[in-house]
């Protein structure tokens, strides 16, 4: 087989965002687009004699992109690629395989929670040998490479059969096609008390898992229905489809509305959960009660010791800055460190590698631990199940007891989507310019204590990440954060994060939007959201 060298030239805008390069699928399918970016990855990380993991969430173009990446890996001199059968791997499973096989990293094809299909979204990201997303220094180097690329290398060969588990050769490169589920499911079995969860299901506990026609279907069926004995059919939308069956595979109350309706209805199951396109996000719902991701992180951290993998306790808890401070209260009670990082799972990597944190979480429906270096939807769902099995309480009771002990951080995120980029930028620029004048200003009966643009210094390597979100803190502990999304593919999405702390014992069981009403009004006043975006109300509320 011949390795071809193709002349190419830079394509503008191949800049990875919060989580890799995400673009509309037709853009990725355009001439040299995928190839240029993959070559930039290989040029930065090096390929000769190396082993990589490859897989994706099964969305449209996943299969063909995998063949291109394999041919390029072979032409660039890689020794071996471990690829999920059908080119499918959930993001946490890919992270696990990178670590388990001590590889030199991996390429994950996904646009995560964004819709898939011929006219929807596609994405490619590189994960490091520790299993985690490449840090900013590496993605920046990849971007720089895309601006100067002149050629890429690709083997002239037919498609590899990725449908059959086993070893095949592609030129001189080994391709190991592996079962995408088995190793990951074994890892889960090593962390959680499957016997206790099995006993709970056997005693009649009912669950609904919505895999949203995305990658977790086969994982959830194997783990929940086969290994843990949940009733067949517990997992719905369990077959991954290239267009996710038209669903928007983002597990939040807006997009997982079928699950929400069931959980809020009569005869709701005991526990409901959903995961996203690539399986790293999760939403958890009790019978009649939604669990905000920030609360979920706090409850999981406070109860993790009930599961066998965490019986020895936690080393620390890390959360992204816009995530509520509920987890910090747990860390304080446990006497362990709490870390506040910028948005993006990659910022947890150093803390996990250095053994400073065991559990991490984000308001964006991500929770995980040091078992892999990605957030992990099914992991969070299984830890909840483990806690429910040990405590024997309902989700609502567990939340009520948690708030009674720690107080409640009322929390919500309001998203204003597909705003013209110049309008969003203008709003943020105006906010930044006025930050110095904010302390002391009164709004909605609250007084601003401080305001800044979050900058983070990594406690492990000292790297600094600036401009990570505008924070406005009030004297009563309420907080507003403004941030532009780094994962969208169309215009800009403004995220407004709203938080208010109530110590209790009164006022712990209010509706979150109602409890946050003054903070929401203040957020609009301060930023002129309607004036800049033309929107009076958010598109998505989580
Ligand atoms: C990605 C990152 C998450 C991050 C999220 C933020 O999620 O992996 O760590 O919280 O982006 O998204 P945004 O910048 O839009 O607020 P995912 O699930 O898309 O990989």
Image: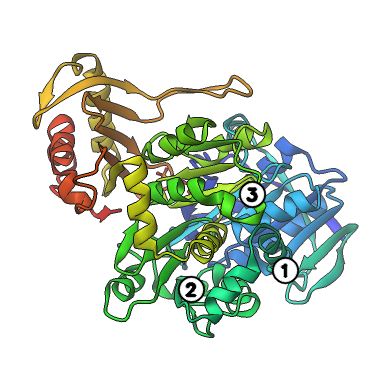
Helix, strand or loop status at disc 1 = helix
Q: Residue at x 54, y 32 (%)?
A: 336
Q: Is any part of residue 285 visible from this angle? A: yes
User: Which residue lies most toward the top here?
Assistant: 436
In the image, the residue with mark 2 has its CB under 8 Å from the nearest atom of ligand 1: no
| Coordinates of residue 43 in the picture (x, y in percent) | 73, 38
Q: Which residue is mark 1?
A: 182
Of tags 2 and 1, which is closer to the observer?
A: 1
Determine which quarter of the picture holds residue 298.
top left
Q: Earlier in the sequence, mark 3 or mark 1?
A: 1
The residue nearer to you, when weighing 523 against 425, is 523
Q: Earlier in the sequence, mark 2 or mark 3?
A: 2
Helix, strand or loop status at disc 3 = loop
User: Which residue lies most toward the bottom here?
Assistant: 232
Classed neighbour count for the residue bearing mark 1: other residues with Cα under 10 Å, few (<14), some (14–19), many (≥20): few
The residue nearer to you, when weighing 418 against 315, is 315
Q: Quadrant of the N terminus?
A: bottom right
| Coordinates of residue 356 in the picture (x, y in percent) | 62, 32
């Amino acid at each position: 087989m011949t390795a071809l060298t193709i002349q190419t030239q830079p394509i503008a805008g191949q800049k990875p965002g919060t989580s890799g390069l995400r673009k509309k699928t037709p853009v990725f399918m355009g001439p040299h687009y995928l190839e240029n970016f993959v070559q930039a990855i290989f040029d930065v990380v090096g390929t000769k004699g190396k082993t990589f993991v490859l897989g994706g969430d099964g969305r449209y173009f996943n299969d063909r992109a995998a063949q291109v990446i394999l041919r390029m890996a072979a032409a660039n001199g890689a020794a071996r690629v471990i690829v999920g059968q059908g080119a499918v791997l959930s993001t946490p499973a890919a992270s696990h395989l990178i670590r388990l096989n001590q590889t030199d990293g991996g390429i994950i094809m996904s646009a995560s929670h964004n819709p898939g299909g011929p006219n929807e979204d596609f994405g490619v990201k590189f994960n490091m040998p520790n299993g985690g997303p490449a840090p900013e220094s590496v993605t920046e180097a990849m971007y720089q490479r895309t601006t100067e690329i002149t050629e890429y290398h690709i083997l002239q060969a037919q498609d590899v059969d990725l449908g059959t588990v086993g070893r095949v050769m592609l030129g001189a490169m080994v391709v190991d096609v592996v079962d995408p589920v088995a190793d990951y499911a074994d890892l889960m079995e090593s962390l959680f008390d499957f016997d206790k969860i099995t006993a709970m299901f056997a005693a009649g506990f009912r669950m609904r898992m919505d895999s949203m026609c995305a990658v977790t279907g086969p994982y959830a069926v194997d783990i929940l229905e086969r290994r843990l004995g949940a009733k067949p059919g517990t997992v719905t939308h369990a077959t991954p489809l290239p267009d996710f069956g038209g669903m928007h595979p983002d597990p939040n109350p807006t997009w997982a509305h079928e699950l929400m309706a069931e959980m809020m209805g009569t005869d709701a199951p005991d526990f409901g959960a959903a995961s996203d396109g690539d399986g790293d996000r999760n939403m958890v719902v009790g019978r009649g009660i939604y669990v905000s991701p920030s609360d979920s992180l706090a409850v999981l951290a406070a109860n993790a010791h009930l599961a066998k993998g965490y019986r020895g306790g936690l080393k620390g808890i890390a959360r992204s800055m816009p995530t509520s401070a509920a987890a910090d209260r747990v860390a304080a009670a446990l006497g362990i460190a709490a870390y506040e990082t910028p948005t993006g799972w990659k910022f947890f990597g150093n803390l996990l590698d250095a053994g400073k944190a065991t559990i991490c979480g984000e308001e964006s429906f991500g929770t995980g631990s040091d078992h892999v270096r990605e957030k992990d939807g099914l992991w969070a769902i299984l830890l909840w199940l483990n806690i429910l099995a040990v405590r024997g309480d309902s989700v609502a009771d567990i939340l009520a007891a948690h708030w009674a002990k720690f107080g409640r951080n009322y929390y919500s995120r309001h998203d204003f989507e597909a705003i013209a980029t110049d309008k969003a930028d203008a709003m943020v620029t105006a906010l930044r310019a006025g930050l110095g004048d904010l302390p002391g200003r009164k709004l909605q009966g609250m007084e601003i204590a401080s305001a800044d643009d979050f900058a983070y210094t990594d406690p492990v390597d000292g790297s600094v990440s600036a401009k990570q979100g505008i924070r406005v803190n009030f004297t009563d502990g309420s907080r507003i954060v403004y941030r532009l999304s780094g994962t969208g593919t169309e215009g800009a999405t403004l995220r407004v994060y709203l938080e208010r702390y109530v110590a209790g014992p009164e006022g712990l069981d209010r509706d979150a939007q109602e409890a946050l009403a003054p903070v929401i009004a203040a957020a609009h006043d301060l930023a002129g959201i309607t004036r800049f975006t033309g929107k009076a109300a958010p598109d998505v509320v989580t």
